[in-house]
Amino acid sequence: MIAPLIAFSLVGLIIFYVQNLVFFPYVHLRLLALLLFYVGLRPSLALTLALGLVLGCLQDSYATTPFGIHLGASLVLVAMARYFRRRLLLQQLGFQALASLVALVLQEVYLQLVTFMLNYQPLFPHDLTTVHAMEILGTAALGPLMHLLVQGVQDSLRRLGWRPRSDPMPYQPFGE
Amino acid sequence: MHHPGRYRTPLLLILTLLLVFTVLSLSLKSSPALRKVQGLVVSMTAPGLEGLEYVGRSAKQLWMGYFYLIGVRRQNAELQRQLEEYKQREVNFREAEQALTRLETLLDLKRQVALPVIGARVIAYDPTLWSRAAIINQGKAQGVKEGLPVLAPQGIVGRIVGIYPEYSKVMLIVDRKSSADAMVQRTRIRGMLKGKGGNRCSLEFVPKSADVQVGDLVLASGLVGLYPKGLVFGKVTAANKKNPGVFQEIEVSPNVDLSTLEEVLVVKVATLAFPEP
């Protein structure tokens, strides 16, 4: 699990850098959340949880919201990814994007509720709701690209010799 | 017979949930351990951002200094023609420029004497919309302390809310946790300037009888001790007296573009001790 965790954490860090240096302040997208969701659709729960903690920690460290808010939000995404993976057996990219949209909406609801309960902001402030909605829609639309990225990272890891637990054991003839 | 991995998933989930809630509750109590974790994460990740930002800036300079010059030859002929025209005006401009330089030097000197500052570069922002914060490349080692105000040439940027060995976290004045005592320059009416997220603030607790108009400058009152008196927060962009209640709804836009900050000054003034909200 260590190799993919390091690889996906590095991908997350690069996405965070790109968001900071290229997109901010003109484009707001939840690319780290999308990355976590698509990694969550892969077999390993432990990897997804660990990645959620790493990415949540990274976001919390740069924010003024109480430490732990983004950690919790990551957990919501992991839960949603696992639910969709088990119940709906998502195979097509379109359905995956729709599922990511639902997960992002639920993550938004979680964040709104927690920040409201911590007296950080009013519940669904009308001035930012449209921006948040556009952010979520734009992020979900990038789902197929994120799928390709996650697949690419996993393929690269396989080429380097890493094999996920769910993969069948390679054939080894007897007597050799 | 139970499968050995049967309880693995629920156990993982319970442990993660416990971790998140523990972290959240520790965070609400401003735990020093969590601050250390934050400091560690920022110290590990911010150098990358700082380096990339430097590379980007250098590439931009290279582009502007060399490649961009290819197109300059065409413009040169046109500029030669314009140059003759502008030479006529040069004498007057030079006179004005010299006066301006003198005044600027005086102003800088006055500022330096009144407010000792530390220059800093903004190297990162919180890219989410949930808070408005920036990371600067000056920290504990350079004498930055929690609560110090941060300024840009156009006005107030925010205040330091987190210090790490080489970096600091600045809460911008538009952050929802930010609040400061402020006054309207024209009428000296006081109110509480609160961040509203996005790129706006609101001036609160101003009675409806008070005279506040669109375009009025909002300054730091200096009363609570967070920001030096007289520095500019922003301009009033909307004032509504038709809302229910006894106070006006006043919207203030910061004087500084808080999303494209590059260099800022951390003012080393004595600040009042205040608890973290």
Image (tube, rainbow, N blue to C red):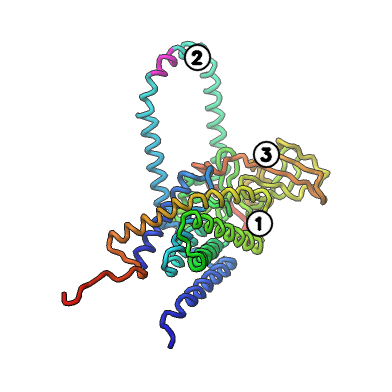
Give the letter of the chain under mark 1: A
Q: Image point 59% across, 53% down: which residue?
A: B270
Q: Tell me residue B243's x, y (percent).
A: 80, 47
Between A4 and B213, the one nearer to me in the picture: A4
- Magenta span: B74-80
Residue A92 colored magenta?
Answer: no
Where in the figure is residue B130, as x and y percent of width and height? 58, 54
Q: Residues within 10 Å of mark 2 (few under 14, many from 20)?
A: few
Residue B86 image label: 2
Classify the position of the C terminus of chain B by image quarter. Answer: bottom right
Q: Secondary structure at mark 3?
A: strand
Disc 3 with disc 2 on a shared chain: yes
Foreground pick, A75 / B263: A75
Q: Residues within 10 Å of mark 1 (few under 14, many from 20)?
A: some
- What secondary structure do most residues of the magenta stretch adopt? helix
Say which chain tag 3 marks. B
Q: Is residue B189 above or below residue A65?
A: above
Q: Which mark is residue A76?
A: none
Left or right: where does residue B248 sit relative to residue B174? right
Residue A88: horizontal and vertical position, in percent? 51, 65
Residue furthest to the bottom: B1
Q: Amino acid at mark 2?
A: Tyr
Please give the chain letter of the residue carrying mark 2. Answer: B
- Quadrant for the N terminus of chain B, please: bottom left
Reading the image, the residue beneath label 3 is B235
Q: Which residue is mark 1?
A: A121
